[in-house]
Image (cartoon, rainbow, N blue to C red):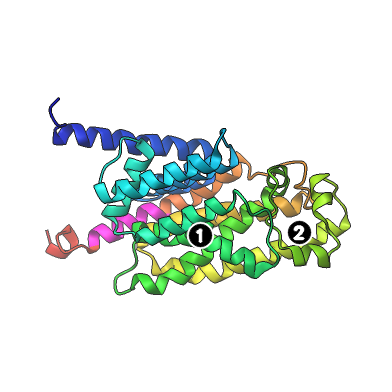
Amino acid sequence: MSAPTQAERQATLDAAYRHCAAIAAEHGKSYHLATRLLTPDRRPAVHALYAAARTADDLVDVPGDDPAGDLAAWSRAALEELDAGWSTDPVRLALVHTVRRYDIPVEHLVDFLAAMTSDLDVTGYADLDALDRYMWGSASVIGLQVLPVLGTAPGVAREEAAPHAIALGEAFQLTNFLRDVGEDVDRGRVYLPADLMAAHGVTREQLAAKRFDARFRELMREMVALTRRRYDDAAPGTPLLAAESRDCVRAATDLYGGILTAIERADYRVLDRRVRVSKPRRLAVFARRLTAAQLARVRVTMAKPNSRSSTGA
């Protein structure tokens, strides 16, 4: 059998990116909506990173007969294929292409996969420091992976924006933890620091029994405030990004920050239900950012040396 032509390889790659976009649209509605504000060349890479993270995470959260073996095999294949530059798996193919195109350090993927592996055995975290160490792999490195795709403003080094990308990844992850307390405990895992739970008189048994009371409300109130401080830490990083990427990040922040508001409006009752940002609210955030994103693209285009404004044409 003859080797595939360049056109055939490109068609396979395009299909892989479309597959990742479908995963993002199905499982990450807020993220997917925000990515529509990105320039078309950046959008597929974010979909690929999301789909890869989702796929690895599902091997743990929606396990087959051998979750440890499945995750190890997927991880090994991804790392080998990064070296080879190609994969027959659509998610890993898009991941390989994205990592190589944007020169994303492979260590970030390794650390993420290590965090997913720890979920197979670790069921709780003693304190916020321990949770932060876990989130380095589960969230911080996701922010660092996405950063090269978003790009930075002229004169801004990636290292300058990195701490804020880390903080935003952690803020999103903490938001997920608070929204999904009930679902996570059903999987045998608790992502609320044990020392804070003890300080408020909340036990794992209470979470497993889905027993809401004033003590749980106050624990959640403290965790929401803590999470908002991570969003505050992330905010100065948005102006450091490429202008045409900023409104995507602002929309994602508004949408995910909106989950915290929804938790508050639900009186922190997240043990037996999943709070959501409504579709009208999501669309309103998108519409508000759309015009700004379009104007940013125009300004960037006009500022290029070969633009009409710069040539005087």
Q: Secondary structure at mark 2?
A: helix
Q: Position of residue 302 (x, y in %)?
A: 23, 60
Q: Nearer the viewer, residue 37 or 139?
A: 139
Q: Residue at position x 76%, y 59% from top?
A: 220
Q: Residue at position x 43%, y 49% from top?
A: 290
Above-or-below relation of 144 to 274: below
Left or right: 38 with respect to 172? Answer: left
Left or right: 222 with respect to 64? Answer: right
Q: Position of residue 265 (x, y in %)?
A: 75, 51
User: Magenta region's main secondary structure?
Assistant: helix
Quadrant where the N terminus sits is top left
Is residue 300 covered in magenta? yes
Residue flagged by tag 1: what amino acid is it? Answer: Gly
Residue of label 1: 137
Q: Nearer the viewer, residue 83 or 21?
A: 83
Left or right: 79 with respect to 270? Answer: left
Quadrant where the C terminus sits is bottom left
Above-or-below relation of 265 to 151: above
